[in-house]
Image (cartoon, helix red, strand yellow):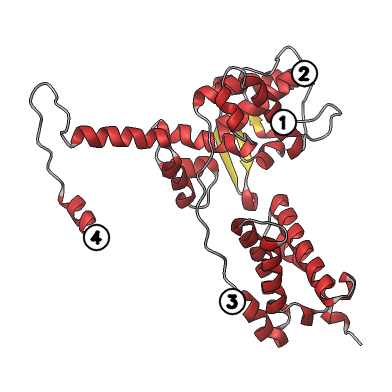
Amino acid sequence: MRREKDGVLRNVESYFRDHLQRARGASPHTVRAYGHALRLFLLFVAQRERRPIARLELDDIRVEAVLAFLDHLESSRSNTPATRNCRLAAVHGFVEHLLRSDVTRAGQYERILAVRSKRTRARVIAYLEAEQVRAILAEPDRRTPAGVRDYALLLLLFNTGARIAEVLALTVEDLRVGGPRQVRVRGKGNKERICPLWPETAAALRALLRRAGLHEGLLFRNARGSVLSRDGAAYVLDRHTKSAAARFPELRRCRVTPHVLRHSCAVALLQAGVDPTVIRDYLGHASVATTNRYITSNTAMKRDALAAFWKRAGLTSTAGARTRWRPKPGLLDFLSSL
């Protein structure tokens, strides 16, 4: 007879309630993503064992099941290696939780934790140039309540580079649209950061507060007064992007999502010469390595670097005398270490 302590679902509940939410303070987005991944995994194991999911036991959580699940994700569900790795991370997190409370199966769990992520190619980051963003921002009809909201939403996304979940969670109390103009954003792990606002963004937010009669509570709402969903925000952006494509046909070839506006903010900051460490804090990145990905994807900056390289190499004639460049010792040491 199966012992109650060996049941899987009881451990799933404690993992999400006690570990992810209480101990780690994971964001609702992380909880949803991990929940979806574990649901897929447990449904797969239940089908593999030919038992209802409620009757799964801890002995069923084995490395063979995990490897078969990963193969199923790529072969049957056509998941990319990146998605496969994210779902493996969710399984790993759950198994680490099991290991903390069930050392009798330590060997079984260690074999699962030894399964490594698959190497993936870094995708080129999609972003919009400033004139393309301006074209999209020109589309909302600010004579209507919906247009006022849409304009404020899209301008705030571009201004702050915030994640869509962070923006949709903003409340009226998070804003300071007087002086200094800023917004308090809660990022991953409930970490807070302050983002300054352009005068135009502050004016758009004041117009939203005035038009919608908002004095407290959530800032961005749908037509029924409820919180605007992620799908709703994506629809708003997609609709205005398609309208702007009449003047910017290249937008038809782009899949513009709220996260693309976050990328576009980062690239615009880089093009303005802002240091990547400052951009890291501005966007709420945990590591500057994440921020540096935008440098590798920015074609305009690469062109500028190539032009500067061409000029420095002396392959073009310039009027007047040219001061001879001499490398600093520190630079020579750096080049020698490559």
Q: Which residue is mark 1?
A: 172
Q: Earlier in the sequence, mark 3 or mark 1?
A: 3
Q: What is the distance, in whole Å, between disc 1 and disc 2 at their CAs?
A: 17 Å
Numbered disc 2: secondary structure: helix
- Mark 1 vs 4: CB contact within 8 A: no
Q: Which residue is mark 2?
A: 145
Position of residue 55 measured from the top left corner of the image (x, y, whole percent): 89, 76
- Mark 1 vs 2: CB contact within 8 A: no
**Is residue 4 visible in this depiction of the protein?**
yes
Numbered disc 4: secondary structure: helix
**Is residue 181 visible in this depiction of the protein?**
no
Q: What is the distance, in whole Å, between disc 3 and disc 1 at their CAs?
A: 46 Å
Q: Earlier in the sequence, mark 1 or mark 4?
A: 1
Residue 337: give its label.
4
Q: Which residue is mark 3?
A: 114
Q: Residues within 10 Å of mark 3 (few under 14, many from 20)?
A: few
Q: Earlier in the sequence, mark 2 or mark 3?
A: 3
